[in-house]
């Protein structure tokens, strides 16, 4: 057992990427994102951290009582269970209706002390954010389309930021050029410098109503 635990410990390298701010009083509400990445070289990992920084800049600009913090877990032995859960949701999500039973999350998801469990999946699935049934927060899976992401990193950045936006309480809107679009038109995104699609006035109002600074 000792050898197995040591191996698991080496496999589950945890890199704390805490993006904290020094608020007054009780401080801002922390929205904790735990990222499960196949390895430290995954092209989506720095983009995920950049998307978290983007939301923190939005929170600062709107004077929200909110701060996103992140942990990164590399090559975790629980990743297989998370991948199975992601595949189940991906296959069933379009057929689920209100009131129907949803796929039960594995214990490995429920046990994570986080508002978001974010999986950088190795599967060819559509990225999604899914509320964890009878639990806390959301489960997010990001697709493994490395070719498309290499062609335009900003598309990947916006996909990740979009899904995190759902975990903050934002919903789809009909503006295809906005971040929370559904469907989206990404043809206007550049490919050289980091760029995020805009938030609508409705997005801002929703965030301010939910995370109003106290």
Image (cartoon, rainbow, N blue to C red):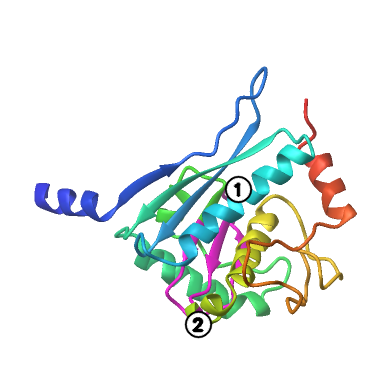
Residue 104 place in picture, x, y as percent: 51, 63
State the residue position of label 2.
147
Question: Contact, CB < 8 Å: mark 1 with mark 2?
Answer: no
Relative image position of residue 95 (x, y in whole percent) = 66, 80
Residue 202 within the magenta-colored segment of the rendering = no
Q: Residue drawn at (42%, 50%), measured in percent from left and top?
A: 72
Magenta highlight range: 118-145
First in sequence: mark 1 vs mark 2? 1
Residue 27 location, quadrant? top right
Image coords of residue 191 (percent x, y): 63, 72
Number of residues whose C-alpha sits closer than 10 Å to that of mark 1, classed few (under 14), some (14–19) or many (20 or more): some
Q: Which residue sits furthest top?
A: 25
| Label 1: element kind | helix
- Mark 1–mark 2 distance (CA, rounded to whole Å): 24 Å
Is residue 45 among the parts visible in the rendering?
Answer: yes
Is any atom of residue 101 visible in this view?
Answer: no
Point 67% across, 48% down: residue: 55
Does the magenta segment cover residue 138?
yes
Circle 1 sits on which residue?
53
Asked if residue 72 is positioned above or below residue 127 in the image, the reply reads: above
The C terminus lies in which quarter of the figure? Answer: top right
Q: Quadrant of residue 83?
A: bottom left
**Measured along the vertical axis of the image, is residue 88 above or below residue 133?**
below
Query: Which of these two is toward me, 81 or 167?
Result: 167
Question: Which residue is found at the position 83% from the left and 53% from the top?
Answer: 203
Question: Looking at the image, which is closer to me, 123 or 24?
Answer: 24
* Coordinates of residue 82 in the picture (x, y in percent): 42, 64
Question: Is disc 2 surrounded by few (<14), some (14 to 19) or many (20+) residues within 10 Å?
Answer: few
Residue drawn at (49%, 65%), measured in percent from left and top?
A: 44
The single residue placed furthest to the front in the displayed view is 192
């Amino acid at each position: 057992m000792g050898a197995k635990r040591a191996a698991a410990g080496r496999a589950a390298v945890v890199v704390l990427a805490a993006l904290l701010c020094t608020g007054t009083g009780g401080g801002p509400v922390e929205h904790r994102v735990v990222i499960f990445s196949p390895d430290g070289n995954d092209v989506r990992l720095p983009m995920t951290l950049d998307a978290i920084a983007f939301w923190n800049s939005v929170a600062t600009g709107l004077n929200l009582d909110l701060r996103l913090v992140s942990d990164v877990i590399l090559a975790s032995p629980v990743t297989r269970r998370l991948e199975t859960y992601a595949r189940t949701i991906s296959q069933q999500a379009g057929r689920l209706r209100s009131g129907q039973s949803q796929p039960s999350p594995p214990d490995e998801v429920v046990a994570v002390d986080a508002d978001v469990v974010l999986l950088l999946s190795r599967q060819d699935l559509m990225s999604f954010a899914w509320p964890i049934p009878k639990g806390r927060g959301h489960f997010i899976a990001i697709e493994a389309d490395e070719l498309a992401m290499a062609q335009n990193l900003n598309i990947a950045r916006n996909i990740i930021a979009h899904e995190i936006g759902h975990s903050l309480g934002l919903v789809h809107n009909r503006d295809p050029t906005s971040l929370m679009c559904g469907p989206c038109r990404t043809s206007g995104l550049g490919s050289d410098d980091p760029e995020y699609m805009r938030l609508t006035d409705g997005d801002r109002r929703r965030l301010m109503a939910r995370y109003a600074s106290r």
